[in-house]
Amino acid sequence: EFDKIQKAWIEIKIAYARAIWTEHQNQKAREILSELMAQYQEGSISDHAQMANVYWIYGALHLEKKEMKEALEKYDLALSASLLAPKSAKMTELQENLFWSIFWN
């Protein structure tokens, strides 16, 4: 039960960060995602698929600000997390997007 609630909570935070980013609040979106990344690093979040998505979005936030080195670092973290996640069509698609982002940036 807790896992379902936590997964939904993380999805809401990701959606909120994307919505904030859409409103041109890059820094606020980073703060939301940074909170999730800290919890993942502490071990209180263990869903690798969700965190791969978080790192990918954070990389895009860096890319938007032309912070290429930081974007590539986040994409690398996203790829690492995605490889730990269960295989799925969604993860395969994210991995393809990550490869594309890393190659072109």
Image: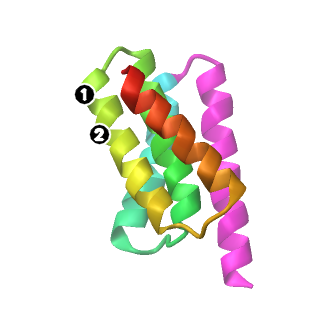
For the point 45% across and 17% down, the residue is 64
Q: Residues within 10 Å of mark 1 (few under 14, many from 20)?
A: few
For the point 35% across and 70% down, the residue is 42
Question: Horizontal and vertical percent for residue 49?
Answer: 57, 60
Q: What is the number of the mark on residue 73?
A: 2
To which residue does mark 1 refer?
A: 69
What kind of residue is marked 1? Lys
Number of residue marks: 2
- Is residue 104 placed above or below 3 in the rendered structure? above
- Residue 85 forms part of the magenta stretch: no
Image quadrant occupied by the N terminus: bottom right
- Is residue 41 placed above or below 72 in the rendered structure? below
Left or right: 51 with respect to 1? left
For the point 65% across and 21% down, the residue is 22
Mark 2 in CB contact with mark 1 (< 8 angstroms): yes
Q: Residues within 10 Å of mark 2 (few under 14, many from 20)?
A: some
Q: Residue 76 sits in which quadrant?
A: top left
Question: Horizontal and vertical percent for residue 5?
Answer: 72, 73
- Secondary structure found at label 2: helix
Q: Provide the residue span drawn in magenta.
A: 1-25
Question: Horizontal and vertical percent for residue 33?
Answer: 49, 45
